[in-house]
Image (cartoon, rainbow, N blue to C red):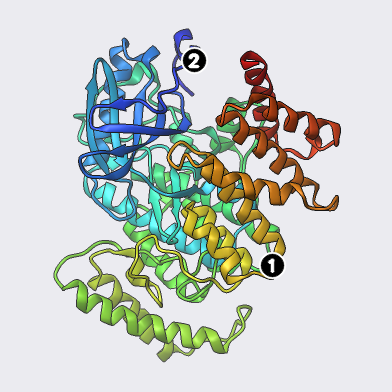
Amino acid sequence: MPDRPEPAANKTAEPDLTGRKFGDYRILRRLGRGAMAEVYLAQQRSLRRQVALKFLKRSLASDETYVLRFQNEARSAAALVHANIVQIYEVGQVDGTHFIAQEYVRGMNLGQYLTRHGTLDAPLVVSIMCQVAAALSKAAEHGIVHRDIKPENILLTGQCEVKVADFGLARALDGEAVQLTQVGTTMGTPLYMSPEQAEGKPLDTRSDMYSLGVTCFHMLAGQPPFTGDSPLSVAVQHVKAEAPQLDAIRDDLSPALCGAVEKLMAKDPGQRYQTATELLGDLQALSVEEGGLSSSSIGGSWTTAAVGMTGTSRTEATQRLDTLMKGEADRASRVERSWRVPVTIAASVLVAFLVGVALALVFREPNLLRPGTHTKREGVVRRDTAQEQFLQAQLLDSEEAYLAVAKNFPDQEYYVRLARLHLARLYLRPDYNAPRRALPLFEQLANLDETQQYFRAAALLGQAQVYHLLQKFSLSQTKLDQLQAQGLTEYLEKEMASEARRLKRRNRSQR
């Protein structure tokens, strides 16, 4: 737990920077906020690219300790150039405002994905584990411990890649790190915190192994192993309580996968995987056993990560891996996912050899590891089902991706309507600023019959937002009144209901 609470000044509301110019950046919209910083999507004008700008909260900028922590995050992450780590572009300050410019990952974090989908299939979990382990292996090469591995810091891209974010608590092992004990050397997230971190003991890479194990448990079980009424109660359980057995929760998991997670979560660091590279060795075998190399998930096949190594050209690696992946895809197409056919010793040796060759050859570009790789890094690809097409659209969050749902699955009305609703909301964002294009989409959804109350409610709210943006405040309020008169407010999600209340107040102030 933190050694002291955050200063009271931290609770002061930070100004919304949307629309402002900040040096070389034009801020488009707020992406999120944390205890120390606020994150915005911005356009870097000189390079014409979108970036995520992380601003240290102004209420903390006068405290040297927080400034040092913020700068330490940038230094730690900037040294780690890897496909599974969010890249840092720049760190600096303008007029006393400290900022970090970093890679913008279009998609969602693992925490959001788990909220929507609950438990995940074993092949998908193994693939995510592989990619996070690859990132941690790279960090270990630089003597860096992440210290806060959790679902919210694992980002999922539209191309089914995984990127580890937020090295804000990262600490070098060489003793040269800034001394930050005053703001809590044990800071992290209690739900995923290692026992030694909860006790304030010195940490090494094995602490990240534990947190990754807890994250994997969450993916497979649908919730973390320990919960409680307070952070302290959860931390105590990590130190003293035994985690539930995964095989008692899910009978479809292999003993090898359950054993790997159990080893990751050992209370004694000496009983865990000692390095991420050691973990990757077991995960590669698991990815074959669980069908991870060819399994289908929300957006296609999630990649099985390999540790970046040098010595052979990427072209040769691609050719070798393409052969391996095609063989796996052909095998998977002939066998149901529930197969458990014993593998002969010779076949096992051959598969192990091929995976080993793949690991040795790849200099790390995740999308090379999938069959049917895409030439566009974030391009829209036709999926097998409407659900997969819509989930890809959510991850990419682009006009083209949402339009592809209706284009590829015009008869799947539910997902077409969801895509239409999300597209209309997209048009309202400052980076699109096209409310008139959103209006006909909202009108179409608002005119659905009474069996589609959710869509009708969301569409009426959308119309109210459009008219407000067009400064037609009376029309905006009329739509909000219709929403209430038709008894549709109960169908609004919590965030949408809050927006309706805010919009009502703004309309009144303008009339």
Q: Nearer the viewer, residue 387 or 68?
A: 387
Q: Nearer the viewer, residue 101 or 331?
A: 101
Query: Which kind of residue does numbered mark 2 sit on?
Result: Ala
Residue labelled with disc 2:
13
489 relative to 256, above or below: above
Q: Nearer the viewer, residue 201 or 302?
A: 302
Q: Residues within 10 Å of mark 2 (few under 14, many from 20)?
A: few
123 relative to 397, above or below: below
Residue at point 52% right, 83% down? 332
Q: Is residue 474 visible to the viewer in this orientation of the structure? A: yes
Q: Is residue 375 left or right of residue 259?
A: left
The image's mark for residue 412 is 1
Query: Which kind of residue does numbered mark 1 sit on?
Result: Gln
Depth check, mark 2 against mark 1: the one in front is: 1
The image's mark for residue 261 is none
Give the CA separation, mark 2 to mark 1. Answer: 43 Å
Q: Residues within 10 Å of mark 1 (few under 14, many from 20)?
A: some
Q: Is residue 271 left or right of residue 68?
A: right
